[in-house]
Amino acid sequence: MTNWLPNLQRGSGPLYVRLADQIERDIENGTLTPGTKLPPQRNLAYDVGVTIGTVSRAYSLVRQRGLVSGEVGRGTYVLERIRTVRPDGVQAQPFGGTRSPLPEPGKTRMDSTAAPNVGQAEVLTRIAERIARDYPADVASYTRTLPTRWLEAGSQWLARGDWNPQPETIVPTLGGHAGILATIAAMTVPGDRIAFEEYTYSHVARSATVIGRRLLSVAIDEEGMVPEDFERVCAQQHPRLVFLVPSLHNPTLSIMPEARRQAIVDIARTHNVWLIEDNIYGALLDKSPPLFASLAPERTFHVGSLSKSIAAGVRGGWIASPLPYVSRVLTAHKMITGGIPFLLAELAAQLVLSGEARSIHARVRAEIAAREAIAASVFAGKDFTSHPDAPFVWLRLPEPWLSSTFKQAAMEEDVLVDDEDEFKVGRTGSPLHRVRIAFTVPESRETVTRGLRKLRSLLDNPISGFDNYG
């Protein structure tokens, strides 16, 4: 047993939260080592001058965070922190997810959702040549100014329904991911907690850990983030920011209804939590419920890009920020990315302002709808979620398939899909036994059909027919 005594003058919020945070800090800095027994609740309550209930709630909170274990009659002990080390002694890389960073050639990629090829190259070539001719000095140098037309393009592209962000609120970005990470960097500091849906675009979550932020997982259901669980997480763990994909959620394809969005906004206001609204897939929809940016403009950073609906290689994106924080986000974006290339930013702006983006958008949506119809036909009779405007399906696997095993079996058939672990923020929650199957990267509908039929064949055959001898 340790003689450890916390200082509850540090921190803010309820005493039990301060105590839990002190325990977590002292575990992280090595003051409380694995195997250390925390003081009995009654003793600690007496020593620091609080009630036993305060200590009990704090101990319960650090158990929820996975930092300690407690057994009746034995006490509360600090857990060993899991560290994965390769045989050569090099620390394993925890940031990459379940995808191979360099897929083998010859595989049908159904693990990516970039906009399908509908002949964008001709338009991009024409505009890029014009930019190189009209702005030779700017193309050859660093970007040192923000032309008003870039802001106007972002304002036009992000506008939805009755919501029209003003150009002065726009930050051009090097794609959606860079914009999201810049917002996190601008509005939080290392050590801050960020809340995510328990299944989500987890590359953002992994990127947040790279820059020192801590992750919190919030339960979801068929309508998206569960307000009651978000309230619990806010009350107990005080996130500074929450990241949401409310329209065509990745990977579940849910569209959060207006009442649910308002409930999340009310909780965020009560607990002073910033909102990042990722509407990159939402750009594929004709209409959606009111945006978070319209419901809570004072605390919402609305992010959009061209990657899913126009052309991923352009890396065009924009943030609509609350006006007081535009400069902060712009600076963070430059520091994280090194700055946006003039050629790409101008290309994205001219695509939007010329009307070419809307033309391509219509063709992309038509191609997605055609491929979604193929997927629905191939998987007829199986349990899956799809949407005519979405570039993937969310397939529930029949018994006895596991998500990771099916992914491996598909890879043996030269088809790459995403298992459910690719979208998990943490290790909480029950397994769903699902995979995400995307269909916009293969060049043709024929290739899509062949890939989907291979996957259907796996579903229709017993799992005993698969074994990996590699």
Image: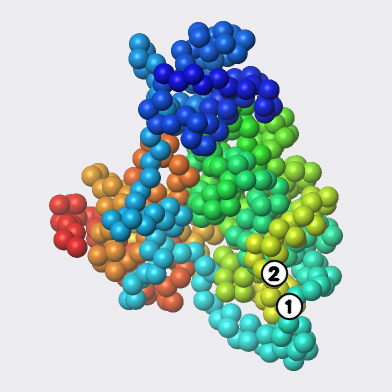
**Taking 316 as reference, is 229 above or below it?**
above
Mark 1 surroundings: few (<14), some (14-19) or many (≥20) residues within 10 A: few
Where does the N terminus fall, quadrant-wise? top left
Residue underneath mark 1: 142
**Taking 282 as reference, is 231 above or below it?**
above
Q: Residue 446 lies in what quarter of the image?
A: bottom left
Instruction: Using the rendered image of the protein, determine whether residue 454 is visible from the camera's viewpoint.
Output: no
Please, which residue is most extreme toward the front here? 3
**Where is residue 75 shown, x and y percent of the image?**
39, 16
Question: Disc 2 vs disc 1: Cβ atoms closer than 8 Å?
Answer: yes
**Where is residue 316 shown, x and y percent of the image?**
66, 69
Q: Residue 365 lies in what quarter of the image?
A: bottom right
Instruction: Using the rendered image of the protein, determine whether residue 236 is visible from the camera's viewpoint.
Output: yes
Q: Which mark is residue 339?
A: 2
Please, which residue is most extreme toward the bottom here? 133
Q: Residue at x 19, y 63 (%)?
A: 470
Q: Nearer the viewer, residue 359 or 12?
A: 12
In this rendering, position of residue 426 left or right of residue 145: left
Q: Nearer the viewer, residue 183 or 358?
A: 183
Q: Residue at x 35, y 14 (%)?
A: 74
Q: Residue at x 66, y 52 (%)?
A: 185
